[in-house]
Image (tube, helix red, strand yellow):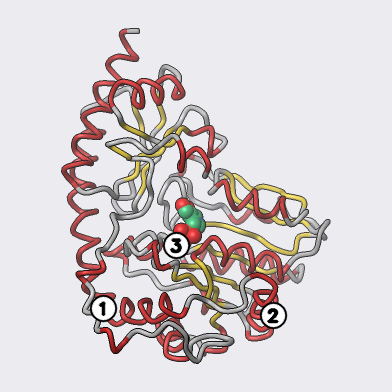
Amino acid sequence: MQWAKIFARVKYNLAVSGVPNYPLSALPVRIEDLEITGDSYYGYEPLQQVIAQKHSVNASQVFFTLGTSMANHIAMAVTTQPGDDILIEQPTYELLLATARYLEANVNRFPRHYDNGFQINPDDVRKSITPKTKLIALTNLHNPSSAYTDEKTLGEIGSIAERIGAQVLVDEVYLDSAFDLNPRSSARLGNNFIVTNSLTKVYGLSGIRCGWVIAQPELTQKMWHLNDLFYVNHVHLAERLSLIAFQNLDEIKAWSCNILDQNHKLLNDFLNSRDDLEAYRPGFGTVVFPRLKNGKVDELSEILINKYETAIVPGKYFEMPNYFRIGLSCKPDIFQAGIENIDKALNDLTHS
Ligand SMILES: Cc1ncc(COP(=O)(O)O)c(C=O)c1O
């Protein structure tokens, strides 16, 4: 995260995983729909309702918070004690690991392999659980590969967890970017599923930090009480804006889909043209995770930043140093220039 905030701030930033910022001026905001302080103690009721509807659950199962980051933190904090085991996919979003370690859990891993499209094999999960496993955590869509985990696989993971009294945390922050699959949230797959999500990545609304957790009411109660230690109430203005965003989600989604569709086409042409890269390509999602067959990704990244003002995320941040992550979510003209720069940097690397 520090690397992304400090070093990846270049003209062609293909290190980002969320679509460009959706402008406030594009939302039909009326001043009378906004208020600085309001009736929001354990959730702002209208917002609780729309999030509950999105997931086909009751409002009591919604905990509203600051982005998926805080959602993951609080979800882990209420389901584990220091010394418990948390089983996390590998590779994964680095901050899931960091949060588990910050909470003094023991982190165990189950693998996701390039060779089978980064799919989860439930047998690997079964082999990796321990009697102390309290939580199994994964991302769907997968960060960094954008692989989609289907309901059958998730159901099997849910049963494995249930047998040892564990919960399954599914971070769905990228799920809505699988537009054509129209995937359903795993919130309804069983009482031991906990889902985290936000409007930050797929909807370009990072600035209002609209994030949430879906869990059983006894857990969301604990989350609200834990939240009283952190920041008591959410910023009400952001809750009001989040509600307006939800009421216009279809338009925002169409805008986002249009950007990602264009970039997926550009990406395909680029990957087809390079035999020094191989990549699992699901055809959806906001990121792709190619493998560099020869050469060092760190060198590629340095050439890109220093010579071409372009950033990618080196695979070392996902414990896979021969890979790198390309974000598909900048504006298409920037994306096109960015991948042209990757093309040039790959040629430089070959000739160096
Ligand atoms: C899998 C995953 N979860 C959560 C986050 C953080 O999301 P938010 O900006 O909603 O806090 C990210 C950011 O990159 C992510 O990749």
Residue 252 lies in what quarter of the image? bottom left
Q: Secondary structure at mark 2?
A: helix
Q: Nearer the viewer, mark 2 or mark 3?
A: 2
* Residue type of the residue flagged with mark 1: Asn
- For image coordinates 25% across by 35% down, the residue present is 338
From the Cβ of disc 3, is ligand 1 less than 8 Å away? yes
Q: Amino acid at mark 2?
A: His
Is 313 situated left or right of 83 in this image? Answer: left
In the image, residue 133 lies at what x, y percent?
76, 60
Counting residues from the start of the chain, the first of labels 1 and 2 encountered is: 2
The residue to which callout 1 is attached is 248
Q: Position of residue 284 (x, y in %)?
A: 31, 54
Label 2 neighbourhood size at 10 Å, few (<14), some (14-19), many (20+)?
A: few
Disc number lying in front (1 or 2): 2
Q: Which residue is mark 3?
A: 173
Q: Vertically, is 56 above or below 234?
A: below
Neighbourhood count class around disc 1 (C-alpha, 10 Å): few under 14, some 14–19, many 20 upward? few
